[in-house]
Image: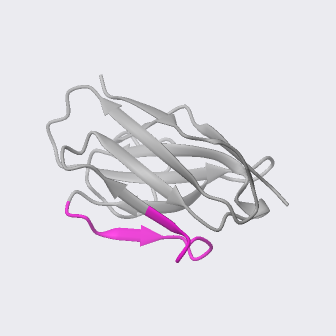
Amino acid sequence: QVQLAESGGGGVQAGGSLRLACVVSGNIRSLTAMGWYRQAPGEQRELVATITDGGNTNYADSVKGRFTISRDNAKTTGYLQMNSLKPEDTAVYYCCLDLLNRSQRIYLNDPFARWGQGTQVTVSS
């Protein structure tokens, strides 16, 4: 059974940085993509960034130039480096593992996706 665990969230002032990590465990037999999503109170979950097994990345316009997604060589840990944080970045951030190695947005009910429990990021002005 594949499980994901996020860490690295917390509170930071505007302009600051945080680095989120997502550790993947379980038996994975396919190439995978990893994505980071976020959900603010009262809002829908939105795509932040994705990275395929081959290293192709995709970012939401709102985070381009500020956030960087990466993975370790073993593909067991993914990261989201967040710089120049803004109050509007405040949300619960979720890690997603796409078992079909797609770079597109993944929806919650996708049978080929696995999700972490989320980590809170709060940016104060």
**Is residue 63 found inside the magenta-colored segment of the image?**
yes
Residue 60 percent location from the top left of the image: 54, 71
Residue 102 percent location from the top left of the image: 31, 59
Q: Quadrant of the C terminus?
A: bottom right
**Image color mode:** one colour
Residue 86 percent location from the top left of the image: 73, 65
Between residue 69 and residue 16, name the one nearer to us: 16
Between residue 2 and residue 113, name the one nearer to us: 2
Disc count in the image?
Answer: 0
In this view, which residue lies farthest toward the top? 1
Q: In which quarter of the image is the N terminus?
A: top left
Which quadrant holds residue 119?
top right
Q: What stretch is highlighted in magenta?
A: 54-68
Which quadrant holds residue 111?
top left
Location of residue 86 with respect to 74 vertically, above or below: below
- Residue 102 is left or right of residue 69, and the answer is left
- Residue 33 is left or right of residue 125, and the answer is left
**Is residue 27 found inside the magenta-colored segment of the image?**
no
Residue 40 percent location from the top left of the image: 74, 50
Location of residue 123 with respect to 83 vertically, above or below: above
Which quadrant holds residue 101?
bottom left
Type of secondary structure dominating the magenta stretch:
loop
Between residue 29 and residue 13, name the one nearer to us: 13
